[in-house]
Amino acid sequence: MSLELGMLVFEAAILAYFLTLNTIYLLFTGLAFQDLLSYRRRWPQRDDRPLLADSAYPPISILVPAYNEARTVVDNVRSLLELGYPEFEIVLIDDGSTDDSLARLRRSFALTAAPPSHPRRLPSRPLRRSWLSARHPNLTVLEKERGGKSDALNAGIDAARYPLFCTIDADSLLEPDALLRIARAFAEDERVVAAGGIIRVLNGAQSRGGRVLRAAAPRRPLLLCQAQEYVRGFLTGRSSLARMNALLIIAGAFGLFRKEAAVAAGGFSLDTVCEDMELVARLHRRARERRTGARVVFLPDPVCWTQVPADWGSLVRQRDRWQRGLLQCLWKHRRMFLNPRYGAVGLVAMPYYALFEALGPLVETAGYLALVALAVSGRLDPMFALLFFALAVGYGLLLSVAALNLDELLFKRYGRGRDLLLMLAGSLLEFCGYRQALAAVRAAGFVTVFVRGRSWGGRPHRLRLTGKEAA
Amino acid sequence: MKPDSVARAPEVVLWEDDPVRRPLLTAILEGSGLAVTAPALAGVALERAAGGGCRRLVLDANVSRPSGTEFLRELHHRLAGHLPPTLALMQPGQASLRAAVRELGVARILPEPFEPDELVAAVRSLARPDERAA
Amino acid sequence: MSRLLAGDPLIALWTVWCLAALAALVAACAILLLARHALGVRRERRFRRRVGQAARLLAPALAGATPAAPLLAAARCRFGRAVVVTVLRRARRMLGGEAERRISELIEQTGEPARLVRVARRGALLRRARALELLGECGGETARRELLRALASREALLRRRAREALLELREPFAVRAAVAAFVAEPGRSSSAVRSFFLRLAAWAPGELRRLAANGRLETRELKLALEALAEAADAAAAPLAIEAVRSPASELRAAAVRLLAAVADPRWTRLLTRRLDDRAWFVRAAAARGLGGLALEPHAHEALGRRLADGHWWVRANAAGSLARQGACGIRQLTSAVRGGNRFARQAALPVLLRLGGPRPGAHPLGGRRAAVG
């Protein structure tokens, strides 16, 4: 009887978890729909340059950390130089590359060596040299000792001359008007200290010379699942959290920060795995503790296209890192957890990330394993199986398709119906192994952290050699 | 059948990507007796502007893909810096864009809104060095 | 589950029903997505094509070459009101004077302003705000009346849109009403002020000058006003800038310097040159940049040359760029800076000279130890 009751409680807990999780996502979708619709009405998709003229846009330093990116770095710097923005500079930080990235950059942009002459306010490994371009006055390349992504970004912030800095990955592409659109948040509201744009999957899209010519859904199932995941994650999750000023994640692949606020907060942390999330959490914490009224916002129309992992190995490493980074950040800022002093960040974002993003994969994996174990032992209750299928798959699928509807209604990124069909297929495929595998990877990440104590499984984020770790 | 004055008039190349503004600008200029070529594609407009027959260029500085400055830079490159006399149409304000097109060799800037007669007068005031000498 | 609820067919039925409803909902969402995409793409392409066709048909009338009434009637009959109004609104944005008035009358004849008035008076707030914005683009008597009425709206967003739309009418009376409403508006945000001033400087710089001169603006707003006038390169605003250059507020001095630089009048060269020694680095940077657009006398050259060794990077870079724009004389100064003993000056001058095809970097190594700058 007690075994029976235990199983019943376990089954009920699994179902309740999925019901709660997906209902929260549904709530997020509703909030996001309302928010994005009003955003679109406020900023219709017409050219707003004559309205907010050049002088209204603050100048921006674009920081591009790169490690062994010889294959793509020149094209990407060229595409950045073509961005439509009144005043910006590019600071490329070569984080001790061992390939010929620097030689290629020197050849392509006529770089001249100059001793670094800016003040050092943030911790980072020593700079070897800085390089100025003879052709482009707004291009600087920093050559430094290897120290990882946070270290490179800190060196870049120190060298940045402008009041805002934008972080982008060396192999990501910004749409030509992305900076104009994201900087609008800072021009409109002085309290904004950080803003994130939307990240879309580049794999499969047609691009030339560092510009995306035509958006298209990728063909390979693994990429398709990630493309669908990005649309849902960015459009529904982030916009609704940002609405409450509780956004904890701004993708390192594309984020804009107020330099003074980031420097005052201590820059990117060198001992964290997910430096972007940690910095945003610190900005929130500082803002609440000092009552500065600072805001972190999400804008759905500045678009950054990025390459996502094309093989399971890279994807598993990426998600494992994200999971460890999330746990590390939650632990580091546990003081905010359910603390009313920190407003929506403490009362909504921290519990949400802890319960559904950190612990969620454990419950999810347990549910899937239980289903398999019960089926194998012949004790699978058809009613439980049916309800589990409805809540875990059916409800999730509904949310994915709703997010696609939202994207199409407001942004119409895909010109061809075939791409939308592929994305719909991606929503379905996501529940056929992809989601379960990633839940298992994240659960393993959780367990690893616990087994090793709070060592977070080793080193902070190093810039990668190949494969993509984007958002 | 164009009247003689139109047939003899120097050719104006107009680069404007907006489907409403292009025919309107063409009608204003043709109405004053100027012969206008207004291609719908940037590549064709570049070829016409870089060709020997182009005696005046009128372009909207706010075009996109390629932008007004990109168009002028490409033309500069093709003509080794010898741009035909060029009139740029611009929204009011836009100080940095105005400075950029000036540096690229635009002879005259006409801010919007303008009266049709102002546009015609501005185009007629553009003169090639050989015409000025004559 | 069924261990607890065993034998309850109602629960089983309910579960199956929920599952079926969920599946139906997913299918409906997917169909909606594909259908909306197919229809939306087709509708958008069709609309764009028809706007182009209508513009070609109406162009001679809008240019004043042929009578408008028959062509307008033909266009409305063939393409519908929405297409025709889109063409007319976009044409009105480009043309001024008599042509603008003629187009506003044509828009009035289509009945579009009356429709927008109905939208502006009820329904969702953002829809009403958008209708006011469009009324500004239509022009004409109906639009003016409604916009003046909206100035007294209880919603701040509607009042802001109405003020900005009145400026788009480009009529002296409407502009004055918008300015008066702006002055009376309590708690103006920076973004609203900036947006209003940029429009005012574009359409009626005289009104903005008057507003800036009457002393009723805060320092923050005065700075935005000077920036907007600089954006419009309004030469008549120079006296305002000359006064602001003496202000103790450094941000105001920088905005004034930017305005004088935008005007690019040689009469203000001496004033700009003096600002090269301002105590605030961003004022020096603005002056160094502004002087680049003027033909300079020897003393101004020398002053710019001295700024190559300024303590702040931005000032050095702007001074080097401005010297490069001065032709042979400026380039001589940059070359001597590269050969001189000051490391900052070498570092600022060399990239500029390299861009101009000057000395090779190897010939004049930059060298020197790392030092903090400003």
Image (tube, coloured by chain):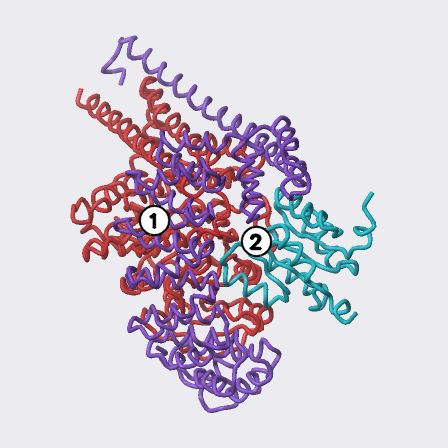
Chain colours: A red, B cyan, C purple
- Which structural element holds mark 2? loop
Find out whether the residues at labels 1 and 2 contact each other: C-beta distance under 8 Å. no
Residue A115 is left or right of residue A348, and the answer is right
Q: Position of residue A77 (x, y in %)?
A: 53, 62
- Rendered image: mark on residue B62: 2
Q: Chain of mark 1?
A: A
- Which structural element holds mark 1? strand
Q: Nearer the viewer, residue B69 or A254?
A: B69
Q: Quadrant of residue A43?
A: top left
Dot 1 amino acid type: Val
Q: Quadrant of residue C275?
A: bottom left
Q: Position of residue C141 (x, y in %)?
A: 46, 37
- For the residue carrying disc 1, how many other residues have a C-alpha within 10 Å: few (<14), some (14-19), or many (20+)? many
- For the residue carrying disc 2, how many other residues have a C-alpha within 10 Å: few (<14), some (14-19), or many (20+)? many
Q: What residue do we see at 68% from left, 62% from top?
A: B125
Q: Position of residue A225 (x, y in %)?
A: 47, 38
| Residue on which disc 1 sits | A297
Residue C158 is left or right of residue B116, and the answer is left
Dot 2 amino acid type: Asn
